[in-house]
């Protein structure tokens, strides 16, 4: 399947109310690098100190709708991932309305 990433821009949303684990930080840095080398514009939306997930989600959704980004990706603050897996989710979003990973 040919996946065209033209026009994709990302808001990466991370709610946190505590310190972020080193593995998560490493994943975030690798993801930023992967987006940068592909020329994909991105913003990182951190809801720092917001332990109410519903409030963090609503505030993030509001900020996303005001932004110029085309894709909202919500990642918990304790999740480690490979940057290529993140890019794969972004690519699949060009063919599907909703994409999730576990």
Image (tube, grey):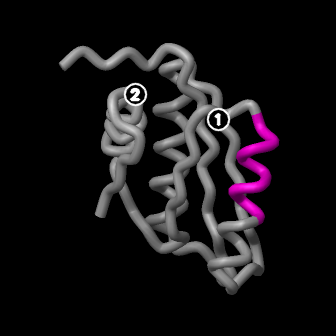
Total residue callouts: 2
SS for dot 1: strand
Relative placement, left or right, of 97 versus 37 is left
Foreground mark, 2 or 1?
2
**Within the magenta stretch, is there residue 5?**
no
Question: Of residues 85 and 101, which is closer to you in this image?
Answer: 101
Relative placement, left or right, of 12 versus 63 is left
Residue 91 percent location from the top left of the image? 37, 30
- Residue positioned 81% across, 42% down in the render: 66
**Disc sitting over residue 42 in the figure:** 1
- Residue positioned 69% across, 82% down in the render: 17
In the displayed structure, 51 sits above or below 82; it is below
In the displayed structure, 63 sits above or below 57; it is above
When asked about the image quadrant of residue 49, the answer is bottom right
Relative placement, left or right, of 45 versus 84 is right
Q: Would you name the residue on which mark 2 appears? A: 94
- State the CA–CA distance, disc 2 to disc 1: 16 Å
In the displayed structure, 84 sits above or below 100; it is above
Q: Are discs 2 and 1 less than 8 Å apart at CB? A: no
Question: Of residues 55 and 27, which is closer to you in this image?
Answer: 55
SS for dot 2: loop
- Residue positioned 65% across, 75% down in the render: 16
**Within the magenta stretch, is there residue 64?**
yes
In the displayed structure, 58 sits above or below 85; it is below
Residue 82 percent location from the top left of the image? 34, 49
Count neighbours of disc 2 (C-alpha within 10 A) and say few if under 14, some if 14 to 19, many if 20 or more. Answer: some
Count neighbours of disc 1 (C-alpha within 10 A) and say few if under 14, some if 14 to 19, many if 20 or more. Answer: some
- Residue positioned 48% across, 73% down in the render: 78
> Quadrant location of the C terminus?
bottom left
Relative placement, left or right, of 98 versus 1 is right
Residue 30 percent location from the top left of the image? 47, 44
Read off the magenta span.
59-67
């Amino acid at each position: 399947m040919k996946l065209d990433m033209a026009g994709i821009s990302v808001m990466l949303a991370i709610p946190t109310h505590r310190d972020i684990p080193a593995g998560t930080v490493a994943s975030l840095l690798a993801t930023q690098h992967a987006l940068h080398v592909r020329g994909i514009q991105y913003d990182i939306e951190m809801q720092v100190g917001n332990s109410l997930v519903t409030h963090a989600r609503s505030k993030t959704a509001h900020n996303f709708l005001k932004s110029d980004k085309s894709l909202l990706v919500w990642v918990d603050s304790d999740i480690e991932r490979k940057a290529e897996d993140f890019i794969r989710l972004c690519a699949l979003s060009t063919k599907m309305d909703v994409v999730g990973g576990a």
